[in-house]
Image (spheres, rainbow, N blue to C red):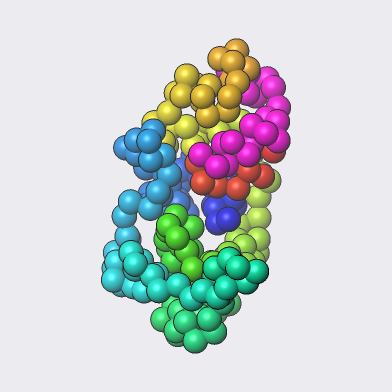
């Protein structure tokens, strides 16, 4: 899943450059019912709005296996996606922003086809390599990341009680860094905010 290092950079940098994720994904106005979603397409990347990536009714290839219809990978469709996006090793901030925008759009897309999932995984690999080389940094503490996402999503500690299925006392200790986030809590947070649970561990 995209965003671990990007979110970490935003937290460490106080929302400063390269706060692409914060500007276009983690916006404070996002409601609790839809906490993390791509709500804007940056200038210069408007092609995403009419891209095959954002098709609301994708054509899915299926085949019957053991009596069940299963999604199959179509090389021609994947080739078309590669031709449209033209991903390559990232060597500039412009290329980084471009591929990050595509990856984020894919991250929050519904009903992704096998081809889009494969493209998403490939883009994440390219982005992680570039981030590792150009933005080396220590990972923020899990509770700092949680605090940032809460602020960006407009959530309170009371909202986390139901999400984490924990008491208000436990949630308070977690948010303030007095108690470690358990694997079950990290998974619940990851599922809700649509980010990797590893961010909180």
Q: Is residue 179 magenta?
A: yes
Q: Give the overall secondary structure of the magenta segment.
A: helix
Residue 9 inside the magenta-drawn segment: no
Q: Nearer the viewer, residue 21 or 19?
A: 21
Q: Is residue 12 visible?
A: no
Q: Along the line of sight, which residue is nearer the eye, 65 or 127?
A: 65
Return the x and y of residue 177 as percentages of the image width and height: 65, 24
The residue drawn where x is 44% and y is 66% is 102
Question: Where residue 199 sits: x, y (%)?
Answer: 63, 43
Q: Which residues are magenta?
A: 172-192
Quadrant of image for the C terminus:
top right
User: Residue 136, located in which quarter of the rendered image?
Assistant: bottom right
Q: Residue at x 65, y 61 (%)?
A: 132
Locate residue 33 relative to residue 113 in the image: left or right: left
Total marks placed: 0
Q: Residue at x 47, y 32 (%)?
A: 150
Q: Is residue 112 left or right of residue 180?
A: left
Q: Position of residue 180 (x, y in %)?
A: 70, 27
Residue at 41% x, 39% y: name it.
35
Examine the rendered structure and indicate whether residue 61 appears above or below residue 1.
below
- Looking at the image, the residue that sits furthest to the front is 67
When asked about the image quadrant of residue 50, the answer is bottom left
Is residue 74 something that shows in the picture? yes
Image coords of residue 161 (percent x, y): 53, 21
Q: Which residue occupies the foreground of this view, 142 or 12?
A: 142
Q: Is residue 137 left or right of residue 19?
A: right
- The relative height of residue 123 versus residue 196 in the rendered view (above or below) is below
The quarter in which the N terminus is drawn is bottom right
The extreme top residue here reads: 169
């Amino acid at each position: 899943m995209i965003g671990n290092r990007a979110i970490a950079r935003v937290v460490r940098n106080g929302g400063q450059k390269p706060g692409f994720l914060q500007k276009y994904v983690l916006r404070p106005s996002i409601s609790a019912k839809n906490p993390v979603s791509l709500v804007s397409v940056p200038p210069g990347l408007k092609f995403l709005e009419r891209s095959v990536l954002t098709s609301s009714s994708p054509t899915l290839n299926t085949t019957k296996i053991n009596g069940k219809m299963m999604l199959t990978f179509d090389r021609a469709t994947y080739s078309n996606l590669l031709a449209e996006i033209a991903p390559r090793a990232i060597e500039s901030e412009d290329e980084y922003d471009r591929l990050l925008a595509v990856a984020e759009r894919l991250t929050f897309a519904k009903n992704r086809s096998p081809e889009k999932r494969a493209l998403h995984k490939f883009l994440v690999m390219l982005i992680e390599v570039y981030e590792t080389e150009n933005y080396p940094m220590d990972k923020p503490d899990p509770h700092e990341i949680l605090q940032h996402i809460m602020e960006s999503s407009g959530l309170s500690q009371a909202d986390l009680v139901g999400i984490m299925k924990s008491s208000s006392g436990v949630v308070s200790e977690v948010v303030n860094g007095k108690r470690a986030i358990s694997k079950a809590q990290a998974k619940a947070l990851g599922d809700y905010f649509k980010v990797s649970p590893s961010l909180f561990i």
